[in-house]
Amino acid sequence: MHFINIYLHLHLTDTLLTLKPTRLLMKKNVLLALALMIAGYSFGQKSADVKANVFHNTVYAHVAYGYPGGTLKTEGVLTAAAQFEVGSLFYINALPLPEKLKLGVDVTYMSISGLINKDNLSNNNQTNSYFTAGIKLGPCLSYNFAGQWVADVFVKLHPHYFITGEQNKYDAATQFKMGSSMGLNIRYKALMLGCEFTSAKYDFTVSDLSARSVQATTSQSIKLPVTFLSLGVNF
């Protein structure tokens, strides 16, 4: 209907002009093409606007509580973690995907986390503590499963520094490592809930505290997986 109105308006304007028959026919063809272009652009713009309400480049910030695993968890060295991150999600609009799917690049500009033994901390004792600081980068697939609800599945590389705070048995020098990250975010408008699994290997000097003579130490490469549950905002 929108197309018909545009075409009739342009056709009526054209009949008021005094043109030769051949020029008149050419003019009508041009007007028809313009009408089709305008109508198509109008329809496409409306569809793009509706889609942009859900899928748009976004900046996010979140805090997370973490659960360490692996050897350091088993040995009672670490029992809890915390994380703060700021990043952006950029969508690749040129990819021909179904309407409810979008592929993007998830860039975390700043990722800071701390790992501790909270049991020792609550007893006012010295506690093992370690920190990480770095960035994350990887692909993200978003799915609009209902209304303003969007689910993001992501996989990222995690280059970062590993820094030792207080320690007892497991000592580690400051070191640069490449870790990995994968997870899921659920977004509703400005609110974001997430679950993320991170993993990296670090080089430790492990002391044998039970040795009676000269303290014995060994070098070990230990994997440290952490599961984070996050709450954040995006805009």
Image: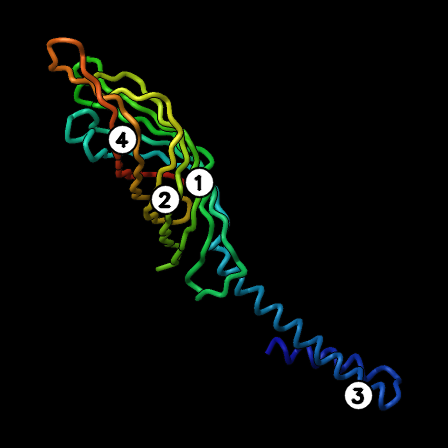
Which structural element holds mark 2? strand
Q: Determine whether, in the image, residue 221 is placed left or right of residue 53.
A: left
Q: Is residue 156 shown to the viewer in this render?
A: yes
Q: Which residue is mark 2?
A: 192
Q: How many marks?
A: 4
The answer to whether the residues at label 1 and label 2 have Cβ atoms under 8 Å apart is yes
Seen at 37% across and 48% down, the residue is 155
Estimate the spatial distance between the alpha carbons at disc 2 and disc 3, rounded to whole Å: 58 Å
Image location of residue 125, percent across then percent down: 19, 13
Estimate the spatial distance between the alpha carbons at disc 3 and disc 1, rounded to whole Å: 56 Å
Q: Amino acid at mark 4?
A: Ser
Among the 4 quarters of the image, the one containing residue 226: top left
Image location of residue 206, percent across then percent down: 22, 21
The answer to whether the residues at label 4 and label 3 have Cβ atoms under 8 Å apart is no
Q: Amino acid at mark 3?
A: Leu
Q: Which residue is mark 4?
A: 221
Q: Earlier in the sequence, mark 4 or mark 3?
A: 3
**Whether residue 199 is situated above or below residue 2 in the rendered picture:** above
